[in-house]
Each structure stands twice: as C-alpha cells, then as structure tokens.
Amino acid sequence: MQGQSVEIFEIRPSWDNKDIVLEHPVAKATYNKTKRHWKVFWMRADLKWHGYQPNPAVQSIEDFLALVQEDRFGCFFG
C-alpha cells in the first residue's frame, strides 16, 4: 500500500531464467476520501495506469479484489 493506493502485482519467474523473479503491476485502487469510494485502474501496454472503464469505482477494497479476481474483460491478467 502506498499512501491511499493499493496495488496488485503478478509475480512469476522469467520465461528464460527461472532464477529471475519478475513483478508486474496489474491493478490499482486509490481511495477517494471525499466520495468515499475506491477508483480502479489497470496497467496498459504503455505501462501507464488507466481508469477501468467497465467499473471505474467500487465501494470497498473487497469489491476491488473481487473485480480483479473475476477479470471479466481480461484487462488485469489478459
């Protein structure tokens, strides 16, 4: 957790060297204190965070985790 944000990473070995462990950020939620919700972001191929348009905000961190796990549109894990 960094400030008011939570990030989820995919952690796996490199395809060509199992001794190297790679970490790729895939999802981020940032708490908006004024609106009392979590804004949801996903990491695109340009390596920048983009708002998750199918569901740009959720009410709880549990909702965020469920949204990422479902990955209905293949944005977080492809």
Image (cartoon, rainbow, N blue to C red):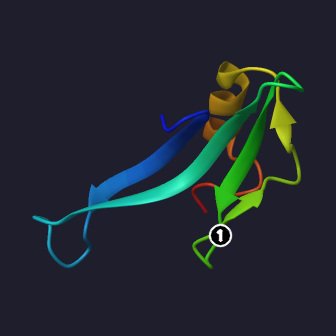
- Element marked by disc 1: loop
> Which is nearer the eye, 34 or 59?
34
Vertical placement of 66 versus 18: above or below? above
**The image quarter in which residue 18 lies:** bottom left
Residue shown at 83%/21% (left/top)? 36
- Side (left or right) of 67 relative to 69: right
The number of callouts visible is: 1
- Side (left or right) of 46 relative to 50: left
**The image quarter in which residue 74 lies:** bottom right
- Circle 1 residue: 44
Q: Residue furthest left?
A: 19
- Residue 58 image point, x, y percent: 81, 30
Q: Residues within 10 Å of mark 1 (few under 14, many from 20)?
A: some
Residue shown at 67%/56% (left/top)? 42
Residue shown at 88%/50% (left/top)? 54
- Side (left or right) of 56 relative to 72: right
**The image quarter in which residue 76 lies:** bottom right
Three-letter amino acid code of the residue under disc 1? Arg
Residue shown at 60%/49% (left/top)? 27
- Residue 28 image point, x, y percent: 62, 45
Looking at the rendered image, the quarter that the C terminus falls into is bottom right
- Residue 13 image point, x, y percent: 24, 62
- Residue 69 image point, x, y percent: 61, 37
